[in-house]
Each structure stands twice: as structure tokens, then as C-alpha cells.
Image (cartoon, grey):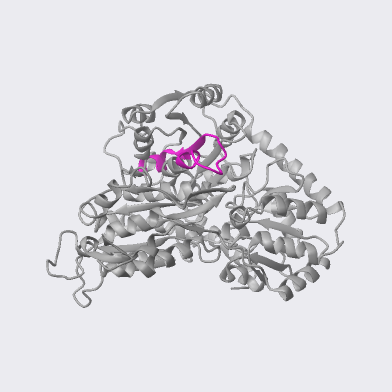
Amino acid sequence: MREGTIRLTMAQALVRYLCNQFIEIDGERVPLFAGVFGIFGHGNVTCLSEALEAVQDRLPTYRGQNEQSMALAGIGFAKAKRRRQIMIAASSIGPGATNMVTAAGVAMANRLPILLLSGDTFANRLPDPVLQQVEHFSDPTVTVNDAFKAVTRYWDRIVLPEQILSSLPHAIATMLDPADCGPAFIALAQDTQEKAFDYPAAFFEPKVWAVPRPRPDRAAVAEAAEILKRAKTPIIIAGGGVRYSLAEAAVADFAKRRGIPVVETIAGKGTLTHASDVHAGPIGIIGSTSANQLAEEADVVLAIGTRLQDFTTGSWTAFAADARFVSINAARFDAVKHRAHAVVGDALECVGELDAALGDWSLGADRLTHAKSLFAAWDRLLDEHQAPTNAPVPTYAQIVGTVNRAAGPNDTLITAAGGLPGEVTKGWRVKAPNTFDCEFGFSCMGYEIAGGWGNAIAQAGPGATGGTPIVMVGDGSYMMMNSDIYSAVLTGHKMIVVVCDNGGFAVINRLQNFKGVPSFNNLLADCRIATPEAPLHVDFVKHAEAMGAKGRACDSLADLEHAIEWALGNEGVSVLSIACDAYAWVPGDADWDVGVPEVSDRQAVKDAYASQLAIRAKQRVGV
């Protein structure tokens, strides 16, 4: 061994390096990598697990039940930490690795960091083909891990032990960069994991990382100020980038002093509390009438930290054709969309410099007064839909309202795909910042419970809200991925899971019907079943209890309210189930562009296609 070096296997060196990376949160130095979700198997059990076992007091390893869900848990953790701490998800080769591709897509779409470490085939190829290897006849360098290239910001394959010297710093820099943030994937050839190398001791010296705050171009800020000064009816759209920049207070203060109402994207919800002086509601397809009317009126749209996806823009039908966009974003790719005037930089820095450039300019009180009047009308509509009735089965809106009222101010709502994103984005009244997590960038069924487990782990560390994660999940998503109830039971983390049982995939059935197609293969009652007596509902309480959770079945909204109070007083995991209406929804008023058959024998489909053409005629022309 050479002087100034440490001889370690590649796997040991990788783990030692990760253990020596730190970041500051609220003035406290904490590990950058808070833990590992791992399932060991062929390709990582003999070398990587040996290295992780030796440092479990410094880098805890949590055993997941499914590679996809454990990576989703890591994503839920990153959201709760606002991208300032990162989890690792480690898998074997073959199906263990490919199970994580979906989770990588979630992180990629949502611009969230997670480090994915997967075993790989032998770099020397001597034992080929090995167990679980998928061979490409024309390219022996390709393995299933190449599938991650489409859904990661950083991708590498380690075939020589010294390659981690450059790869690991690049992976971390990517995950912490606000412009490039996303998942990093590193494939670890299994024979390379075992190889020893004389690593420079300096490689393992503790390093404290920081999330960079790139400042904007001065000319771009000056032009943005001039555009805003000419505005008569502007709005601010707050996206997830506001939260990840820790710019919530700055944006709220800027909006109040300048007299501009703030509407929120799905990822941006939780930037403001529901009762904030400048809050005017969620925008878009699953947004509020107040925000959508303000968007339609807007002559200037100041978009901060949003990638402007179709659920925000109503497939680009929500704004006037001549509305001017000013886009503040750390990522140039997002900032230049739809011919926006781009201000590229960190949200907090950009808002501060724009504020200074505006001088004493203000709209006065009229625009905010108008916005709050519209928002008050929206609140009254929510009250109507969330109020209990004598109906035998409650609606999603009523269930959301009941859970929201019972939740503590720091409890975090977590949900994902299906009907719940629309109902909670519209109807969940945020009581404290950063207490709302709706994964709707990738709309990933199965994120909910895994994300709740990740959030629960995050609540134990610095910068946490200190509340309880409350997961709301439909029966369809529950059936798709529920095993992290057991994971959380094993690790002793607390969360509440509310299962809304509407008998299948109700919201996609709604879309199917709305576009002229009869109900087919979405609700359980409309799918292929053996006999009319086949059970159309699962006993979710018994199922959860079998995994060690506490459970209650609720027959009414009053039962649900009492059950939430009971669950908040419990330790560990509590699962509550309640039947809900599959056809009742809070109304929306934004358009959505989806594919509809151009030719059909069904008149309902022909009518839907004509309606879709009318929607497309309203779309802004852009890129």
C-alpha cells in the first residue's frame, strides 16, 4: 500500500466516501446521506452488504419489501427534506434493478434527488451469461441497467475500482444542483465491487456540501421588472422550486408588498398556508375557480419554480393568447418555455433582485382584494361539497374535509395518483408550509404508502415539521403497492393511512365516460370476474392488521373523525378504511387535452372529439 492511501475494496471505499459527506440544515451539520433502503441479492449481497453492515451505526440500512417502493420512500424523504438530504436505494442486478426504473421516473419528473446503486454483471465477462443477465447479441456492454439512462440525470457504470474517485463527486453535485437535480444511478459490476485499490486518503476526508444559489443575469432581471411594471392584472404562479429554494416567505412578502395574488401548482401547494393574505388557490385542471379566473385575466404571469406542466396550464388553454410570461427558474430548460422572458437562477436570489429592481412600484390593493373575493367564493364552494349529508356513502370531498379538520397543523398530507390528487389539491386547506406532498408529476400509483414511510423517517431529523404523515390512498393504489405498511411497522415509524374504497379505478372511469366510452375494466364491477358473487371490496383493515398495523373500518364521516383522533394518539402505523362515492367530484373549470378517437360508431365519442377540437383551438402556440 502506497503512503497516503487506504486499501479498500471498491464497495468499501464507496460506502466510506458516502459516510463522509455532510450538509448543513438549520445551522447543524448532518450527514448528506441519511440512510440506505436496501434489498440484497445476486450482485450486491456479498460485497456491498459487507461494507454497509460495518457502518450501520453511521449509515442505517432499512430493508424494503420491493425495490420500487423503497426508492419511492427515498423520494418521499427527499421531498420532506426539500432536497437537502438524500437517501440511497440499493438493489441486486436484473429484476431488482429494473423494479427501480419506475421510481427513477418519479424522481426525474419531479426534479428530486435519490442515489440508486444497482449490482451489474461481471466486468470481465468470464462467467457470462450470469444469473439474471439479459444478453444483447450485438452489444455485450448493454445490461438492463442501461434502462435507467432515460430516467436519470446522472448515469455511470463502475468497471474499475478507481472510477468512483470521479463518479461519486459528479453524482452528488448533480443531485444538489437546483438546475440539474434528479436521480443519480451507478451500476456496480459485481466483480469490481470485490477488487481492492489503494485509494487516496484525501478522498475520504469529510466534506460539507451546500445547495448552490445561482444569481440571475442583471439584464434579465431589469427586463423582467420593466415587463411587470407595465402589468395591470398580473399573477404569480408558485411552483415546487419555491419550496426547494426555501423562498416561501420571500415570495409571500414580495407578493403582498407589490399587490400580486399568488396561485400554486400541485408541487407548489404548501408554499403558502390556506389563510395567507396573498393566497388565491391552486391553478389548473385540478385547481380552483379563483386561480383559474385570475389566470384567464392575467396580462403578465410571473412563474416561479415551475415547469408549467399541462395540469398547471390547462394544456395551455388557461391563459389569454397575449399574456406575457416571465419565468424564474434555476433550470434554463424550464425558464424558456412558451416564449417566456427567462430569468435563470435560484428562486430566492431572483425574487430578491427583482424586488430591488422594481423600486417603489406596486399595483395597490385592488388586485389582491379582487383575488381574495374570488378565493372566498371558492372557499364557500368547498364548504358546500365537504359538508356532511345523509347520503349512504360519503364523497371524496367530504372525506378530505374530515381528515383535514382532524389533522394537526404540522401533519403532512401525502397522496399520489387517481382521484385523490384532484380532491386534495382543491380541498386540502394547508395549515403550515411544507406539509403537503402530492406526487402528480409522474402520477405514480403506489407512491402513497412508500412516500409516507419516507416522510416518517424524515420527521425524525433536522428541518422536519414534527408532525405525523397522513397518507390518503385509493383502493386501486393500495392494491398496487402496500407492503411498506409492514416496512414502517418493522422500523417503528408512525404514519396514518386512510384508504378510500370506491371499488376500483374511479377517476379514470370518469375520464373514460367523459370521453364517450362506456365503463370498462376500471371499476371492479365492470371488469372480467368469475361469478357475480366475486368480492368487489377488500377488507383493508384485516389486511393491514396482518402486517402488524392497527386498523379501523369507518362507516361514516363521524366514525372517520374519531378514528383519525385515535390514530393520532397511536404509535406505529394505523390504517383506516372508508367506502366512498365513485361518481361525485368537486367541479373543475379548466380544459385538458387528451387523445379521443377521430372515428367512432359511438355518437358520444364523436361529440367528445368535437369538444376536444374546440379545446385545442384555444391552446397557446408555443414550445
Q: Is residue 127 left or right of residue 442?
A: left
Across and down, in percent, residue 245 comes to 61, 56
From the viewer's perspective, is residue 441 above or below residue 276? below
Across and down, in percent, residue 364 comes to 87, 55
Q: What residue appears at the point 26 percent right and 70 percent down from the top-left corner?
A: 160
* Magenta extent: 456-480
Query: Where is the N terminus found, in terms of image quarters?
Result: bottom left
Q: Is residue 364 left or right of residue 15?
A: right
Q: Nearer the viewer, residue 66 or 543?
A: 66
Quadrant of the rendered structure where residue 132 is?
Answer: bottom left
Question: In the rendered image, is residue 445 in sight?
Answer: no
The question of residue 465 being in magenta is answered with yes
Query: Where is the C terminus found, in terms of image quarters?
Result: bottom right
Q: Nearer the viewer, residue 504 or 597?
A: 504
Q: Nearer the viewer, residue 597 or 524?
A: 524
Q: Residue furthest left?
A: 127
Q: What residue appears at the point 61 percent right and 26 percent down from the top-left corner?
A: 389
Across and down, in percent, residue 120 comes to 24, 63
From the viewer's perspective, is residue 564 above or below residue 41? above
- In this figure, what is the number of numbered marks? 0
From the viewer's perspective, is residue 112 above or below residue 463? below
Question: In the rendered image, is residue 470 in sight?
Answer: yes
Q: Nearer the viewer, residue 99 or 561?
A: 99
Q: Is residue 332 left or right of residue 476?
A: right
Q: Residue furthest front?
A: 3
Quadrant of the rendered structure where residue 125 is?
Answer: bottom left
The question of residue 330 being in magenta is answered with no
Q: Is residue 243 left or right of residue 78?
A: right
Across and down, in percent, residue 231 comes to 81, 65
